[in-house]
Amino acid sequence: MLSTLAKSAVRPSVSKVVRIASLATAAAKPAKKDAKAPESDSFCMNLFRGRAVIDQVFPYPLKLDDDHRETLHLITGPVEKFLEEVNDVNK
C-alpha cells in the first residue's frame, strides 16, 4: 500500500515537469528576420546604416553668403565620399 501511494504521488509532479519543459522548448523557436531593415527617418540610424540624408542635416533654408556656401560644400563633399566608400554597410 505504501508503494502505490508513493508512485501515485510522484507521477503527477513528473508529468507537470515534462509538460513545462515541453512548453519552454516550444516557445524558444526564433522568428525569422527579414533581410532588409525597415526605412527610418532617424538621422543617426541612417548614419549607422551608411546613409546620409543631407536634407535632415540642413532642413532650414540656407541663407549663406558665398564664402560660407563654399566652405559648406568643401565639407559636405568629402563627408559624402567617406560615407559612400569607407563606411560601407555591406562589408
Image (cartoon, grey):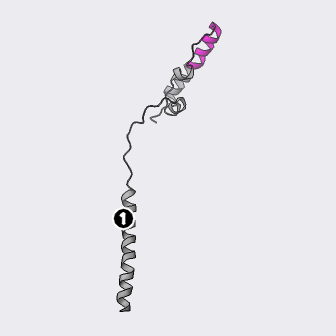
User: In the displayed structure, does residue 8 sit left or right of residue 50?
Assistant: left
Task: Name the amino acid, label 1.
Answer: Ser
Q: Is residue 67 shown above or below 45?
A: above
Q: Is 5 or 84 nearer to us in this picture?
A: 5
Q: Quadrant of the N terminus?
A: bottom left
Indicate the position of residue 48 as horizontal and vertical percent values. 52, 34
Question: At 63% across and 14% down in the image, what residue appears?
Answer: 71
Q: Is 36 or 26 nearer to us in this picture?
A: 26
Question: At 37% across and 62% down in the image, what residue appears?
Answer: 23
Q: Which residues are magenta?
A: 60-76
Q: Is residue 18 shown above or below 91?
A: below
Furthest toward the top, the residue is 66
Q: Is residue 64 magenta?
A: yes
Q: Is residue 50 shown above or below 54?
A: below
**Mark 1, residue position:** 22
Q: Is residue 21 magenta?
A: no
Which of the 4 quarters of the picture holds residue 67? top right
| Crowd class of label 1 (few under 14; some 14 to 19; many from 20; radius 10 Å) | few
Indicate the position of residue 2 as horizontal and vertical percent values. 38, 91
Furthest toward the bottom, the residue is 1
Q: Is 30 or 35 nearer to us in this picture?
A: 30
The kind of secondary structure element at disc 1 is helix
Question: At 60% across and 15% down in the image, what residue appears?
Answer: 72
Q: Main secondary structure of the magenta part?
A: helix
Q: Is 85 or 8 nearer to us in this picture?
A: 8
Q: Is residue 42 shown above or below 78?
A: below
